[in-house]
Amino acid sequence: MAEVKRVLDALVRSRRGGLAASAALGGLALITGLALRATQGEASTGEAPAGEAPAGKAPAGGVPAADPVGMPFVAGSLSDDDATLCLRIMVSASAADGVIDARERGRLDAAVAESGLDLAGRQWLARELEDPATIDEIADRVQNPETGAHVYAAARLAIDPDTMQERTFLRMLAEALDLDEDAVARVETGLAA
């Protein structure tokens, strides 16, 4: 389901509007950037040596810089399977407090409309909304720390943890994905930047 990346991108941009738009990144790149920050530690905080552009930012010449560990900062590194996991966890996170409210549902509907999701994709998403995946179902499909960081970043972008249920959901997700407190803190720092 190739459209899942478009839905995920639109959903993150609608959720974090100003952050993704002002950085000229888009939703997938924002997830990837937060995941890099989480897995690479201090090396991926986005601070570049003097005279260089920060990771993912274009220097004066207009060509994006490489990230601090020498890999290009591209959203294309998120596979379709990983994007599907991210979308599933965003639905689950949205339902963590017991209900997907009208505002959350409206954002999701707008993202689906913007992405041009086909009928089969809409039916798949409707099933996810009816019966969101559990943390364990998602964690069982995660094969490496990078995917775990992508999944956690997507969940965190889906919600503002302003209820006990949402905070508990994120804590349990981090534990299931084997993300340590420092990695979680780096995601939070990235969101605050």
Image (cartoon, rainbow, N blue to C red):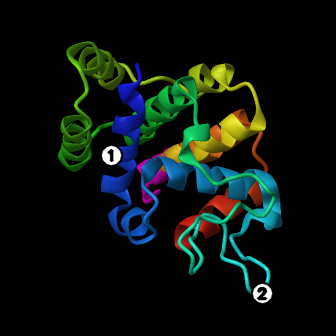
Q: Position of residue 86 (x, y in %)?
A: 51, 35
Residue 50: mark in rendering: 2
Viewer-proximal residue among 137 and 65: 65
Q: Which residues are magenta?
A: 155-165
Task: Decide which of tag 2 and tag 1 comes sooner along the chain.
Answer: 1
Quick one: SS at disc 2?
loop
**Badge 1, how many Cα within 10 Å: few under 14, some, many 20+?**
many
Task: Name the residue nearer the viewer: 47 or 16.
Answer: 47
Residue at 45 percent across and 29 percent down: it is 88
Q: Amino acid at mark 1?
A: Ala
Mark 2 burial class by Cα count in 10 Å: few <14, some 14-19, many 20+ = few
Above or below 54: residue 6 = above
In the image as oriented, which residue stretches furthest toward the bottom? 50
Residue lying at 67% horizontally and 35% vertically, measured from the top left: 147
Give the foreground label among 2 and 1: 2
Residue 134: x and y, percent?
52, 24
- Answer above or below: position of 135 versus 179: above
Residue 116 located left or right of residue 34: left
Q: Report the residue marked by disc 1.
A: 10
Is residue 28 highlighted in magenta?
no
